[in-house]
Image (spheres, grey):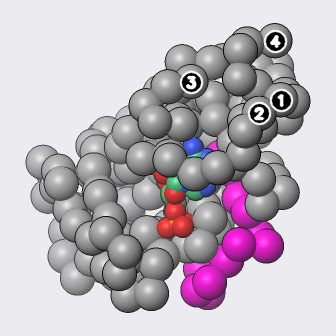
Amino acid sequence: MDRGIAEPLLSREEISARTAQMAEEITRDYRDRDLVMVGVLKGAFVFLADLAREVDLPLEIDFVAVSSYGVDTESSGVVKIVKDLDLEITGKDVLLVEDIVDTGLTLKYLTAMLRDRGPASVSICALLNKPDARKVDLEVRYCGFDVPAKFVVGYGLDYAERYRQLPYVGVLEDEGSGGTG
Ligand code: 5GP
């Protein structure tokens, strides 16, 4: 096991099998639609790369990067857009692809922001979901795995910018926060 990882939670094989299933659902649901997959940087870059390659449809890919407004973020749910979309999404079907949904505040904010631009639809696809940590109502249309409210890393997820490259998801030894997405 890699240094700093207390327990592996999801193996690369489990992630890969579930990603293929999710991609199948997305392929079915978005046939004849105008799909734009939007990854939330940085954490979603690995998942988006694997997911998009399993979706058997023409599609566009773009990214947004967000950062918190400091201590107020948790209560206000306001996030700062560090990198906005390059693509126009008016009339298109946007699928927001995220590594993990925790409180739900980030995606609540992003969904509302993107809906203001007149897309045909905005849905959420997340590899991981912490249902026990949710603070706002949020529909996660495609959800890979429910995980306990522990701090996880790997497969795109970081602790202080480390561990993103791990091909699996694990629980950090010294549980804490520090993920920057
Ligand atoms: P939310 O707005 O749903 O509370 O926050 C979602 C973001 O918080 C994720 O995109 C991720 O950046 C970060 N986050 C939440 N839980 C974890 C976790 O267990 N590990 C890591 N590395 N980041 C997390």
Q: Is mark 3 within 8 Å of ligand 1?
A: yes
- In the image, taking residue 45 as reference, residue 2 lies left or right, namely right
The Cα atoms of the two marked residues, 4 and 3, are separated by 12 Å
Disc 3 residue type (three-letter)? Tyr
Q: Which mark is residue 163?
A: 3
Dot 4: element: loop
Please tell me which of labels 3 and 1 falls first in the chain: 1
The Cα atoms of the two marked residues, 3 and 1, are separated by 13 Å
* Ligand 1 found in image quarter: bottom right
Disc 2 residue type (three-letter)? Glu
Which residue is depicted at the point 44% across and 46% down? 181
The Cα atoms of the two marked residues, 2 and 4, are separated by 11 Å
Which residue is depicted at the point 28% across and 45% down? 63
Q: 9 or 98: which is nearer to us?
A: 9
Please tell me which of labels 1 and 4 falls first in the chain: 4
Picture coordinates of residue 164, whole percent (x, y): 52, 26
Are the residues flagged by discs 2 and 4 in contact, CB closer than 8 Å?
no
Q: Quadrant of residue 119?
A: bottom left
Disc 1 residue type (three-letter)? Ala
- In the image, taking residue 20 as reference, residue 45 lies left or right, namely left
Q: Which mark is residue 173?
A: 2
Dot 1: element: strand
Are the residues flagged by discs 1 and 2 in contact, CB closer than 8 Å?
yes
Query: Looking at the figure, which quarter contains the N terminus?
Result: top right
Picture coordinates of residue 5, whole percent (x, y): 76, 25
Please tell me which of labels 1 and 2 falls first in the chain: 1
Q: Which mark is residue 15?
A: none
The Cα atoms of the two marked residues, 1 and 4, are separated by 8 Å
Magenta residues, as a range? 127-139
